[in-house]
Image: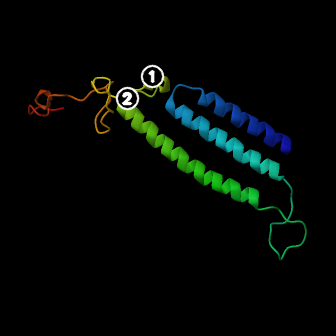
Amino acid sequence: METLFAVIIGLLAAVGVFLLLSRVIVRVVLGLTFIGYAANLAILTVAGLRDVSPPLLTLPGPYMDPLPQALILTAIVIGFATTALLLTVALRAYQVAGHDDVEAFGDSLARDPGAEDGSFADPEHQSPDRPDLEDEDASPVAAGGRP
């Protein structure tokens, strides 16, 4: 049984590293998630895969240690919250930059290259990769047309 778990842990870690090396931001987030799953299974495997009694005082015999299960449960909750946060940041980065290529982000998300003083870009507007319309009268909606 430990051999099967070792193979599964190795596959999850390998797929996670492969996805982590990708240039697409959603694949990077999924790669981190797979590496977290591999770590959870590693903790479970190291704790031992024995068929012993749960830690209840009414049952006889050697008891199973509940600490690894508590650690894994906590890691699952934290991993879910971290994945949700990373996906939200990835969505916002895609909305601002207009692409999901991690290498092409550069500094365009943080700085406005058109500003003389090097100030930060406004988070309420598009990045310099996709600037907003400067003149509101030039838009079809302002002229009474359809968008």
Which residue does the numbered mark 2 point to in the structure image?
Answer: 97
Which kind of residue does numbered mark 2 sit on?
A: Ala
> In the rendered structure, which disc, 1 or 2, sits on the residue that comes first in sequence?
2
**Residue lying at 50% horizontally and 41% vertically, measured from the top left:** 86
77 relative position to 62: left or right: left
**Residue lying at 35% horizontally and 33% vertically, measured from the top left:** 96
Q: Mark on residue 92?
A: none
Residue 67 in the image: above or below residue 139: below
Residue 130 in the image: above or below residue 86: above
Q: Secondary structure at mark 2?
A: helix
Q: Secondary structure at mark 1?
A: helix
Q: Quadrant of the N terminus?
A: top right
* Residue 107 position in % (x across, y down): 41, 26
Q: Nearer the viewer, residue 53 or 128?
A: 128
Point out the residue furthest to the left here. 144
Cα separation between marks 1 and 2: 9 Å
Which residue does the numbered mark 1 point to in the structure image?
Answer: 104
Which kind of residue does numbered mark 1 sit on?
A: Ala
- Residue 117 occupies quadrant: top left
